[in-house]
Image (cartoon, coloured by chain):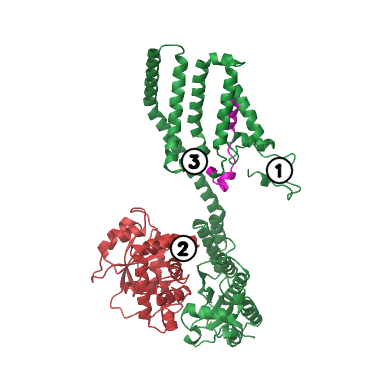
Amino acid sequence: MTSPTPTAPTKQTSPIRLVLVDDHRMFRSGVKAELDPAVTEVVGEAPDVDTAVTVIKETRPDVVLLDVHLPGGNGNGGVDVLSATRGATTESGQPVRFLALSVSDAAEDVIAVIRAGARGYVTKTISGTDLMTAVRRVADGDAVFSPRLAGFVLDAFGAAAGEIAEVDEELDRLSAREREVMRLIARGYQYKEVAKELFISVKTVETHVSSVLRKLQLSSRHELTAWAMGRRLL
Amino acid sequence: MGEYGQVPDPQPAVSPAAPSIGERPKLYRSSTDRWIAGVCGGIAEHLGISSGLVRLLMVLAVLAGPGVFVYGFFWVMTRPDTAAADGVPVARARKSLTKNQVLLVIGAAVLIIGLGWGGPAGQIGRHLGFLLPVVAVAVGAFLAWSQLDANERSRWAGRSKRGRVLAVARPVVGVVLATVGVVALATQGQGFDVVLTSALAAVAVLVGATVIALPWVVRMWQGLQAEQTERIRATERADIAAHLHDSVLQTLALVQRRADDPATVIRLARSQERELREWLYADQNRSSDSLASAVTTATHDVEDEHGIPIELVVTGDRPMDDGGQAMVKATREALLNAVRHGSPPVSVYVEVGPTGVEAFVRDHGPGFEMSDIGDDRLGVRESILGRMRRHGGAAKIRRLESGTEIELTLPPLEKGSEAASPSGSASASGSASGSAPGSASGSVSGDAAGAEKSAEAQPTGGRPA
């Protein structure tokens, strides 16, 4: 997400409790320095899969910033953390949400963590304010799509090729509105810009994005990743 | 044979199949002109004579005796040509023995043996008890060893169930034949009992030898495999090290030396990151002259030139054509405009679909304070709007709340020539996007018809000084 004007912090009674999972200590401290402690409180850090699982179960954070590539576990990095902490809840009983963070553009990495349950994906070059916006969005249960992920979704679901779902519930295709939202995100629009462009509320945009995320997680069309890659994307 | 391509031929058009004088194809085993292993075909190609003649000579030589060894020698010492591996599947390219040819060979053999019976080769008949086992051993060895030939192996193993059965059956039959031959040789003129005892003894020895040798052979095989893997890994490591040294380490050194110049450092880091990424996630399927790759290259060029990161997303792809070329150039111009007069983040989204190509170049510039443009007016008007229109596309410039977005559209490829009317492509883009962008944000917009007007009314794009 790219925004020169960060969304004003919503009224949050307590800061978002955050766990950083990344094998690069320098990156972790960099992120910590960028985050506003009033909005997000880092309650734990982990450099590998096994530590991450323990820390997440102990601290029960609201959001986990999860690196896609991690040592340990079964060798699947972030996916291992997600599967090992499935069902984990925060202190208020909400499910722990994951925001995937990666330097990798490889589709299979990104799609793998999303399908394992991550609520969004951003690249490590994201600015501090954008990262905070993304964290808050994920904490609220919404999805965070980078332009690149949106582009990938358009390709994987054949939406760029003109395939549109007749019924919204259809899992293997995007609805016309979802496609529009994805296209605007791919064009670098913020959620609120998308909302304005389509004459809908930001909440509706978030709903559309979440529904695309659900399709991405449940659809068997994911097998078409290979196809999309063959057509050269990401 | 794929060798012809390398032959320097003063008159290339005359006959590509005939090697020029002085240069002849290397001696390989032919994969296209072959009966058994392609030895004769290869020799014929090498010498530039008819393969039929070579075969005739070879058959005569084999009948005379030493030919077997000559053939075997060539088989072992020459490599198969690679022509078949590149294109034509071996199995199909192989000139298989037709029924007639088989009959011909059998007929010739019968004839020769028949003639020899009473005539000059009559003595052979008397030594048939010796000759037959030798032939059996030779055929057995041939069957067993032919399995070592990678080409043959793939031919047999590649084919379904029958092929795999044959692949196993050949060495087994070969070994059995050779064993029988050896036993027969060793028991010349002995009684049946002796033969049986000898055969049993031979089998027992074979089994014993196998039992003893098997673990050793297996271990050796495994060791060989491990060593091979290790060697491959070492080569890979060396490759990676070489690459990192040439790219990443050099850049890091540069970054340290230019530490006082943040813009350069950012540019270095960015281009190095991209280069490394391309190397790591290289996409083999990507063709170098497609629209997507051209847009990517153009974007990277602008990025490098100005040191401003550009977020690029491309979906779909299509081969390059004139329209695509124009679009890439217009996109590049729009990007230059964005990095010069707008402010980051700059993003590009290109969608190649059945309804045509759409490209969006977006920046977050203030839009209004750009009074220092001047020459760029021509840039925007001609390089973007005019160029797209000339190729049947359209361009429009919208001012958003924060920043500017330039939208380029191009009609689909098939109807590229007749659907060149700007309105056609504009309606395509309209139906594809499902929203009316012009009215949506109240910006000055329009498809091709109003494009020029919008450019003039557009403050960011091309306001004259």
Nearer the observer, A171 or A25: A171
Give the secondary structure at mark 3: helix
> Which amino acid is tagged 1?
Ala
Q: Which residue is mark 3?
A: B154
Question: Image check: A124 left or right of A136?
Answer: right
The quarter of the picture where the N terminus of chain A appears is: bottom left
- Residue at 59% from the left image edge and 29% from the top image edge: B71
Where is B452 relative to B300, above or below? below
Pointer 1 or 3: first along the chain = 1
Q: Position of residue B423 (x, y in %)?
A: 57, 82
Q: Position of residue B339 (x, y in %)?
A: 57, 75
- Colour for chain B in the figure: green
- Segment colored magenta: B65-91
Q: Are marks 1 and 2 on the same chain?
A: no
Nearer the observer, A20 or B174: B174
Res. B259 visible in picture: no
